[in-house]
Structure formats: structure tokens, C-alpha cells
């Protein structure tokens, strides 16, 4: 999963932020789903964070994410630093977390109750 946080005082336009055509990742990493981290509060940092659910990443593999066409609630398009009309970001892959949960402590509260 890739988290993309947009810095803007305005809310994101959900349709453009969740449009798969507005994102590309190279190196055979597939974007499978896109969603807003907190769609109930679009003015919070989590409301301006887009989650790109991807196929499994290779640990330490370098990826390039291209973003284009994202607008805010008023139709203002994300600024780019070039005339290409898109913004490019590099990041390293992280392997999937395969560590199962485990118990760190158990406390006996009374003769019928334990706290884990």
C-alpha cells in the first residue's frame, strides 16, 4: 500500500483523487484499489490522504509514482514542477508484514477474569 498525502487547505475532489487513470507506478506494481483514508473528514490530514492499494512490493525495490489530474473541491488542479502536467515521486518498496500477532502479557484480575 502507498499513502499519498496532499497538502492543501481545501478538501480533495474525491472523484479525481480516486481515479486510477491519475496514477501510474512503474516496475510492474499494480494499483488494485484507491480510497481516501478518512472520507468522513475531508478537511483533515487523513481526509487528504489517498491510499493506493497495490500488488505486493519487493522489499527495497525502487518505484516511481506519477500523479496527474488531481483537483481540490473547487476544481483547482495540483501544481506540477514541470511543463509535463504531472508530478513524479520515487519511493522504496516495503515487504508485506508477515509477523503474526502475539500476546505480550496476561494479568489475572480476579478468579473469573484475565486481562490480555
Image: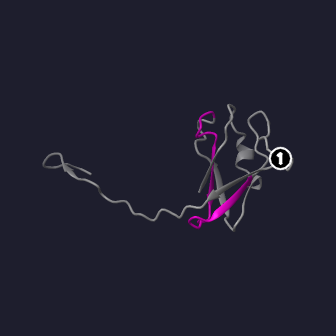
Mark count: 1
Q: Quadrant of the N terminus?
A: bottom right
Check if residue 63 falls in the magenta segment.
yes
Check if residue 57 falls in the magenta segment.
yes
Residue 73 in the image: state x and y as whole percent. Answer: 74, 35
Q: Residue furthest right?
A: 83
Q: Residue furthest left?
A: 111
Residue 61, compared with residue 47, is above or below; it is below
Residue 102, compared with residue 80, is above or below; it is below
> Position of 38 compared to 16: left or right?
left
Residue 28, compared with residue 3, is above or below; it is below
The one of 10 and 13 positioned closer to us in this rendering? 10
Residue 63 in the image: state x and y as whole percent. Answer: 67, 61
> Who's the residue at 85% across and 50% down the image?
84
**Mark 1: secondary structure:** loop
Residue 6 in the image: state x and y as whole percent. Answer: 67, 41
> Position of 96 compared to 36: left or right?
left
The one of 6 and 36 positioned closer to us in this rendering? 6
> Who's the residue at 70% across and 59% down the image?
64
The part of the chain drawn in magenta is 43-66
Residue marked by disc 1: 82
Residue 74, by quadrant, is top right
Amino acid at each position: 500500500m502507498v499513502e499519498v498525502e496532499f497538502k492543501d487547505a481545501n478538501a480533495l475532489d474525491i472523484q479525481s483523487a480516486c481515479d486510477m487513470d491519475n496514477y501510474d507506478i512503474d516496475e510492474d506494481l499494480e494499483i488494485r484499489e484507491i480510497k481516501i483514508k478518512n472520507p468522513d473528514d475531508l478537511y483533515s490530514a487523513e481526509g487528504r490522504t489517498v491510499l493506493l492499494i497495490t500488488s505486493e512490493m519487493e522489499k527495497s525495490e525502487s518505484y516511481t509514482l506519477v500523479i496527474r489530474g488531481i483537483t481540490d473541491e473547487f476544481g483547482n488542479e495540483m501544481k506540477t514542477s514541470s511543463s509535463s502536467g504531472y508530478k513524479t515521486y520515487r519511493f522504496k518498496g516495503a515487504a508485506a508484514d508477515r509477523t503474526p500477532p502475539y500476546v505480550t502479557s496476561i494479568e489475572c484480575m480476579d478468579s473469573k477474569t484475565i486481562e490480555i
